[in-house]
Amino acid sequence: MNIYQKLNEARKLIRESEVKKDGVNQFSKYSYFTPEQVENLVAEACEKTGTICLTSLDKDEFGYYQVLSFVDMEKPEEKIAFRLRTDRPEIKATNLTQQMGGMDTYSERYIKMKTFQIKDNSMDFDSQDNRVDKKVVDDVDFG
């Protein structure tokens, strides 16, 4: 298989897995794939397809971005590179190193989700009722 066939096979393996979302957002009431679950799904698919993902955080004149290289372990010259823009989060009671670590962890999860087509409808605005609650609007004083 070439690198694109291997990526396609890895995506298929992940789609066909029966992993249930472990993360729960109590405030917004939805479940999600945790970073550990995404990592395990990707690692297992890569192991079965003879590939590896290498990630790194980089910065250019436009800001930070996560890079993922999907590499064929039998032919390392065959690889596909993916990039995903990110930004440093403002996390209260943390120092810059902790904020950078958070940015790296979350952007790595999201680039892996994008690369391997791990869909999470809870993050899709179209999967939610985005209408404004009429009672809330009626209670607002615009004057």
Image (spheres, rainbow, N blue to C red):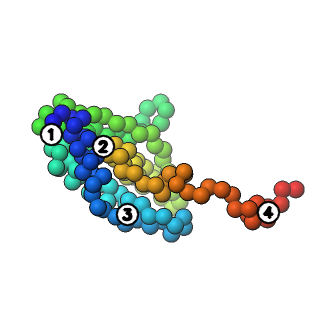
For the residues labelled 3 and 1, the Cα–Cα distance comes to 29 Å
> What residue would you read off at disc 1?
73
> What residue would you read off at disc 4?
138
User: What is the crowding at mark 1: few (fewer than 14 residues within 10 Å), some, or many (at least 20)?
Assistant: some
The image position of residue 119, as x and y in percent, is: 40, 51
Instruction: For residue 58, say whether it is visible.
Output: no
Query: Regarding mark 3 in the picture, which secondary structure is present there?
Result: loop
User: What is the crowding at mark 4: few (fewer than 14 residues within 10 Å), some, or many (at least 20)?
Assistant: few
Disc 1 residue type? Met
For the residues labelled 1 and 4, the Cα–Cα distance comes to 60 Å
Q: Earlier in the sequence, mark 3 or mark 4?
A: 3
Q: Which mark is residue 143?
A: none
Q: Nearer the viewer, mark 3 or mark 1?
A: 3
- Name which quarter of the figure residue 139 lies in: bottom right
Q: Is residue 128 left or right of residue 53?
A: right
Q: Earlier in the sequence, mark 3 or mark 2?
A: 3
Q: Earlier in the sequence, mark 1 or mark 2?
A: 2
